[in-house]
Amino acid sequence: MRPTWPRLAVPAPVTLWLLLCAGHLGSSLAPVPALLESRARALAVGAGALSLAVAAVRSRRPRIGSGARASIVEAAAGWGSLLLAGVALGGESDRAAWPLPVHPSEVGVVLEGRVLDTAAIDAEPPTVLFEARRVRVGEVEEPCRATLLLRWRDETIPPRWLLPGLWLRMSGSYRPPEDARNPGGTPPGRWLTGLGIAGTVAVDPLSLSAPADPPERGSDLGAIVRDRVARRFAAALSPPVAALARGMLLGDRSGISPAIRDSFRDSGTIHILSISGLHVCILAGFLSLLATALRLPTGPAIGLELLSLWGYVALVGAPASAIRSAVLWTAVRSGRALGQVVRPFAAWGLAGLLLHLFDPASVLDPGFQLSFTAVLGLGASGALSRLPGPHRKEAGMVLSKLKAWAGGVWSLFLQSGGATAGTMGIQSRLFGAVPMAGIALNLAVIPLCTLFMAEAILFLFLGAAGPALASMGAGALEASGLLLLALNHRGADLLAPWVVPRLAPVALVAAALLALLVAWARAEAARGGDPARASAARWSVAALVVAALVPLASVWSTPAASQGPAVVLALDVGQGDATWVALPGGGSMLVDAGPADEERDAGKLVVEPALRAEGRGRTTVAVLSHAHLDHFGGFAWLARRRWVATLIENGSDPSGVWRAPLREALHRGGGRLAPLSRDSSFSVAGRSTLAVVRGLEGGGENDRSLAATLRTEGVSVLFAGDLESAGEAAVLPRLARVQVLKAPHHGSRTSSGQAWIDRLSPRIVLVSCGERNRFGHPDPEVLDRYRRAGASVWRTDQEGAVRVTLGLSGGWISSRRHPAPVFVAWDGPGGVTPSSHIP
């Protein structure tokens, strides 16, 4: 007997979008020739025209086009047209993701133009959207038209009189959008380019002036509304709650602190901080209740609902998640007005198809990916809520209400679990962890979010009624906001997210999403009286389990390039140190972890993404050179996330307040602290040796730094912490010649003396320092000493992360700014500097 395949119901929009996605994914993963990618659009149009022509012939002349051959040609041409269109869209999105500059130079400018948006003027840091109409660089002034993001020098508070539409003239420093400075990092400029912003300007606050007779008056109505709403929230609420309200109603998350964003992310409720289907459904529900209260007929009620809904989407800037929800809601409600049933599955496919066609780069946006995969997980879990049960007579009203309440909780739990499973692969790639608390926490957070949004809307209406009513509304909104913040903070603490050490393969994530899509199609087929609903539920369970287990593949997989050469990666953590080493045999080592404060943690934002991108998993050994924040700050985060197995340190500052959090983090992550009381040598990953020399006893903390020499494959690499002249003199007799040196103390003038350089004779010198740091690191004289000694000097403040691949005869050097490798021989004449190979 032939096997019977389960019946699937895949709507036409979903099929069309799948073909586009297949072409897009193929052009991104496979080596598609550039010639084909550039001509894919014309080929797609030609194949589509052929398919339509064959269809027209078959309809007008049935005898000629009735054969199976014509049918095959029509279908093949149609499918080929869509696949080629996907290839063309993939080429467009790839061009939109072309590399941006790293550490671009700032340019002094004088700008004239108008303020576009001030909703984020109370954010941290404050920002204002500005449209430049004239620009002067040096002595040349020209007309222009560019959207820029204004920031303020020296942490100056921007003037409160800035309003949308105001014409200004100012001076400042322009900086173009910037690419990621480290592997695995998020390019900060990609967000700007996606919004059509041409860069940022650090404004001199004393240069602001407004002409008495501006060349242009007026402003965007949406910008005025956003400004009024944001200012009202800021005036009546505490900063955390005001920022939360702006994020949930206006889609502006710039004022939400990193700690609050982390708590929402780790608790699995990050979706409520951006305009998504939840917010659109809440707003649409309010509008539906209003229409019912006004007793409007069905047609006008739906028209009012959709008009208000799309107006709100335009007000918040039309993010992909909001457009997806609005398209889905519009399709379903319009179908109802026309007497047609439009299933969510078809509306979901239509929204994806339209967004993909009009903005191919949107599919690369994390918000797009999380939004659509969450709905895919919801749809795949739909069959579980429709399982047939035994028909029994209700025992009474109380039991009936309890059953209805339990059914509602179960439905909400299924939705939360389905959305979590659908986004699990994407979240593991984006965030390096999968939140486990969200499945249960959303049962409380979603109703509380609905209450918070209702109170926020009520507060805005009461503001026009009088101060007393506005104060009452603000009090209720404040209480709900604080409760929402506290609930997420506690949820993230009670159940920590599941850390995924390596990136799940894109093909595996795509396969899991395809399984969810098949489960949703199976559930749709089982709607209309299909007796095999239990079979559809089994498909749903299987697909959800497969999607949930996808991130585990990165745990089971073998570390990438485990037999490759040793690699030294100096990460750009700003003013601090963090260097990762890939060892032959699959092990790895981390020396220092960069700084951390309330706004920025290098361990979270720089080191962890780089470790995941490199794919080696947990570090074999970590070294903390000395007890200064710019070196140990990121270790607490990395230890909690199980990246650190053993942390070697110098044992100084035993009573420091920083030790307790670090010890607790290591305990939670299964690591341990290993203070060294004397010089020691270790075997690392079987084929490498790490010799650690203690610094100057009784000196300052910089001079107590550990000097760690890694010897691997016949090459020596020295990590010297923040040793200064006294510390260098103390450890130098115990050191030998090295090929690669991490310059001590960020290249300061108090380090790297001539005796130090003569003894070590490094061929490659890595300097880790922050851009425009207040200490003046590195010192030009120090750099000249290294170069005169024949060393190739590379700085993270100019190059971004610097990678050195170690070989027997020399090292290959590349950086984020200059990715083309440059070879430096261990015994060759003269050093190569980054500037010598700039095209």
Image (spheres, rainbow, N blue to C red):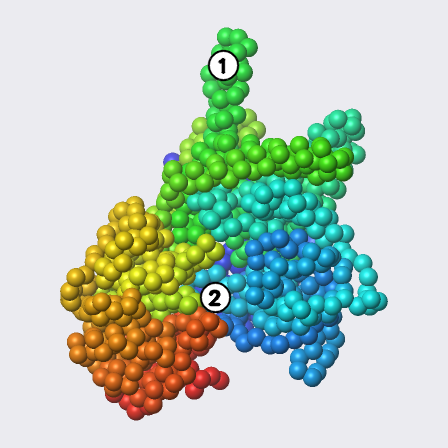
276 sits to left or right of 143: left
Which mark is nearer the camera, 2 or 1? 2
Q: Residue at x 38, y 39 (%)?
A: 495
Q: Residue at x 76, y 55 (%)?
A: 220
Q: CA distance from mark 2 to mark 1?
A: 60 Å
**Quarter the N terminus occupies:** top left
Within 10 angstroms of label 2, few (less than 14), some, or many (20 or more) residues? Answer: many
Mark 1 highlights which residue?
Answer: 391
**Viewer-closest of 786 and 399:** 786
Coordinates of residue 244 in the picture (x, y in percent): 57, 44
Q: Residue at x 75, y 35 (%)?
A: 466
Which quadrant of the figure has residue 294? top right
Say which mark, if any, is on residue 265: none
Coordinates of residue 314 in the picture (x, y in percent): 70, 50
780 sits to left or right of 257: left
* Amino acid found under the numbered disc labelled 1: His
Q: Disc 1 on helix, strand or loop? A: loop
**Viewer-closest of 428 and 31:** 428
Coordinates of residue 566 in the picture (x, y in percent): 27, 70
Whether 110 is drawn above or below 627: the answer is below
Q: Earlier in the sequence, mark 2 or mark 1?
A: 2
* Amino acid found under the numbered disc labelled 2: Ala
Total count of labels: 2
Mark 2 highlights which residue?
Answer: 180
Q: Residue furthest top?
A: 395
